[in-house]
Each structure stands twice: as structure tokens, then as C-alpha cells.
Image (cartoon, rainbow, N blue to C red):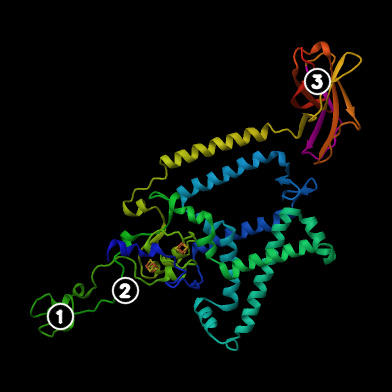
Amino acid sequence: MSSTNQEDYRDSIATVDNSGKRIWIYPKKPKGGFYNKRKLVTYILLLILFGLPFIKYNGNPLVLFNIPKGEFIIFGIYFAPQDFHLFVIAMLIGIVFIVLFTVIFGRIFCGWVCPQTIFMEMVFRRIEYWIEGDYKAQIRLNKSNWNQNKKLAKKTLKHFLFILVSAVIAHTFLSYIIGIDALWELMTSPVDAHWTGLFAMIGFTTVFYGVFAFMREQVCTTICPYGRLQGVLLDENSLAVAYDFERGEPRGKLVKAKKGKKSECKDGCSTCKTNDSSCPSKTLNATLENFLPEPKGDCIDCNLCVHVCPTGIDIRNGTQLECVNCTACMDACDEVMIKIKKPTRLIRIDSYNGIATGARSLWNTRVAAYSLVLISLIVLESFLFISRSSIETLFLRTPGMLYQKQDDGYISNLYNYQLINKTDLESEITFIVKDIEGAIIEVVGEAPRTQIRKISEGAVFIKLPASSLSSRKTNLVIEVIADDKVIDKVKTSFLGPRK
Ligand code: SF4
Ligand code: SF4
């Protein structure tokens, strides 16, 4: 086969045939050590996902992403929309971390942590195995008529459970947005009080049901942008689920050796090495070695690794974009190797270089560069987080207003302020103009006061003696005081007559 032909499988994906039609994947039910570990990881992650919305800290949710209201709580710390820069940097940290992790450890995230794979392989697929049986039984069931093999009952039960789990997932995600109390209120109040919420829930449930019941691995192979990035992220040193072609090839079926007796050989020719029926002396007189098949690699071409693959690929072809590193093929192959008394890990987590040359190196220029960027971003985020004030002040001269000359020799400017309170406390606020003798602040309306996790607004006049102004525009620093402490300092400008 030419090298071009050997790479043909890269021109198409395993789940689409030549006419462009979807090939439905029936993966064999996985089992083995890695699968058991994945189950454990899944239980922990699902416990966190479904349990977090119920945990409260100081009467507030531990985690909340209320995008419509601009309210974000992460591990009990409240973030306002004004902290958006922290969110952007956190996103960048997440992206660089995933890139760095992928460069070193390949796509392990997809198979072990990604919610799509976890729900698909560990929840929905297991419901399917439970109701319809393993892959061969599923194929039989799908080919049978609706009145055979309890097909109608099995399909109805399966899709009912799929919709139910999809609804639970949709409600859980909503609880991260509006909070568990608001969700409960929504669920227990009359439907006509929240039609929008009801339609949103039906919409999200339908999307989850569609993804897990029908789209399945297509999400990973054709939609997920992270999957598309693998080609540029992985190199020959990246770890991934990989087949040891050095050990496995040339692959071939197991052939039992036939026994002969060396003493019966009359001719001593070598014909029997290839075919005992062509023995010229018809004595079937070969040594054991003569009848052994040609030396082969450890792969016995049983195709079990292909049967268990949820994306329908043959990992023996090399690293492919469809592979989500779920390690199901590792378990399957290990089981085969144990049966034929060969060392396990013919399919293992290794790099291309590790398999081809035995040289493994996780540290290279790319890894160093990504690590540097990641550390810099973490330092920046930490600094901004530590220096972030719990009450933020915006203090701006009222647009379109000129200065006013007062009878007492003062010049006044009107300002608007906003107090963004990120705490659960309310405080009286005082503004003081720093370093200007005789400066007066007169509050318009109610005295400034913060409200719990809210923005309070108001206006003040700042009056400065005309004698203290040396130019048309004077820069001011305003101290914001709460409970006798300076909690923030803001800069603004003051307009006066031309000198
Ligand atoms: S499971 Fe192992 S032995 Fe069987 S085909 Fe796959 S790589 Fe070869
Ligand atoms: S090739 Fe192996 S690790 Fe990759 S998706 Fe298929 S079964 Fe999972």
C-alpha cells in the first residue's frame, strides 16, 4: 500500500460513509481498570455538578452566574459586572491552561472530564446498555420490527429516561444561573406565572435530549472547537492514547502451530515451512518451528479496540481527531493481551516519539512558552484580585454642566457618583476632597449610602475657593470614607474660570 493510501482514513471521519450518510456507532460495552477509574471520576464530578447549587455560604449560593442580572458569585465571593476584566483574564487562564495541558497530556480532558463525554458515555450510554443490552443486542433490536423483542417498550422506556435526565440537567444548569431558591419557586408556582421560564426549560431539555440521544459523538467530531484544535496543539512528544505499532505490527490472527516429527523427514527440504501438503515425501515430517506462522507482532487483529470505541475509529491507524482519549480501547486490548499471555499496554498513553524511539520528553520550547504565559496571567489575576476594592466608586463631573460662581467667592461643579457595593453590608459614605484647603462637598438629596450588592447613585456639589484654582482645569482626588476608613480613592477634574 502506498503511503498516500495508508493515510486515506484521514480524509474522512469514521461516522460518515462515502455517500455522506451517518454511520450509527454501536460501541461494545467497555470494562476494565481504566473504565472503573473513569466511573469513579464521573461520580465525583457529577456529585460536584449536582451538589454545588445546594451549598450556601452566608445565606448566598456558593456559586452563581446570574448573567441577566449581572450577579456572579464564585466560592462565596461576589463579583459585579465591574469585575469583568477579572473574568476575561480568568477565561484566558483557562484557555492557556487547556492548551498547555493538551500539548503535554493530549486530549485526556475530553474523555475524562468534559461534560459531553461524561453524560454521553457514563449516563446516557449506560441507560442504553441497561435497557437494550450490549452492542450486538442493540443492532438486533434496531433491525427488528416494532412488535418483536419488546422493541416498542424498550425504546419508549429509554427515550422517557433520556428526556427525564435531560430535564434534570437543564434544571441544574438553570440553578447555576438563577439560584436554587429561585428555581424551586419557578417549579412550584403556577405555570401561567412564568411561561417564558417554562419555554426556556423545554428548549434546553430538548437541546440536551437531541445531543445525547441523536447527535452523540458528532458533537466531538464536528462541532466542538477544542476537537478541531488538536491538529495544531499535539506534536510528536504529546501524550495520547496510542497504539504501539513497533510491538503490534505486523498484525495477524492467532494461528495454532501443527506438530510433526523431525525423525520422519526423509528429504530435509524446506517445503514444509510453507505448506505441509506439498511435502515431496508425504511424511508430514516437520519440526514445530517449521509449522509456526511467520513471526508476527503482538496485535492479533481481533478488532476489539475498534468495537469498544465510542467514536468508531481504529486507533491502530494513529492519532485521529475523533479520538477523545476515553481509554476504552486500552482496557479492551489489555484484556486480549492477558488472554494470549503477552505484556499489556499494546495500546497505552504515550507519545509518538515514545513509541517510535523510546525517547519521551514532556518539556520543550512550546511547553516553556505556554507555561510562561500561564504563570504571567495567574500573577496578573492574583494581583488584580487582591487589589480589588469591595466598594467601588465612580465619580464623574455631570456632563453638559459648566462651573457656577457662588456669592461667597467659591466656584462649584456638579458631580454624579455611583457606589458599587460587593459586600453584604450597608454603610454611610462620606466624600472628602484631598489636599485642597477649604474644599466643601454638598450632597444633593439623600446622604450617600451603600446597599447590599447593589449600585447606589447620587449627586454632590464640590465647592472650591476661587483663590485655590490656578488654571481652568484642576485635578482632584476624592477619598471615599466608610466607617472612618478610606475605602477607595477616585480621580476627577474641576472646572473654573480661565486665569
Ligand atoms: S485489541 Fe489489541 S490485539 Fe486486538 S486488534 Fe486491537 S490492538 Fe490488536
Ligand atoms: S480510539 Fe480509544 S481512546 Fe480514542 S476514542 Fe476510541 S476507544 Fe477512546
Q: How many labels were placed on the picture? A: 3
The local crowd at label 3, few if under 14, some if 14 to 19, many if 20 or more residues have their Cα within 10 Å, is: many
Distance, label 1 to label 3, CA atoms, is: 110 Å
Residue identifier under label 1: 285
Mark 1: give few (<14), some (14-19) or many (20+) Cα within 10 Å.
Answer: many
Q: Find disc 2 in the rendering and name its residue.
A: 254
**Res 11 → quadrant:** bottom left
> Does 394 appear above or below 252?
above
Quarter residue 431 falls in: top right
For disc 2, the neighbor class at 10 Å (few under 14, some 14 to 19, many from 20) is: some
Three-letter code, disc 2: Leu
* CA gap, disc 2 and disc 3: 89 Å
Residue 451 place in picture, x, y as percent? 84, 39
Rendered residue at 54%/57% (across/down): 224
Q: Position of residue 438 (x, y in %)?
A: 85, 14
Image height of 241 relative to 336, above or below: above
The amino acid type of the residue labelled 1 equals Asn
Q: Which residues are magenta?
A: 415-434
Label 1's element?
A: loop
Residue 220: which disc? none
| Numbered tag placed on residue 433 in the rendering | 3
Q: Nearer the viewer, residue 205 or 35?
A: 205
SS type, badge 2 = loop
Furthest residue toward top: 467
Q: Quadrant of ligand 1?
A: bottom left
Please tell me which residue is depicted at 30% across the width and 65% down the height of the picture.
297
Q: Residue at x 30, y 64 (%)?
A: 249
**Rendered residue at 78%/58% (across/down):** 183
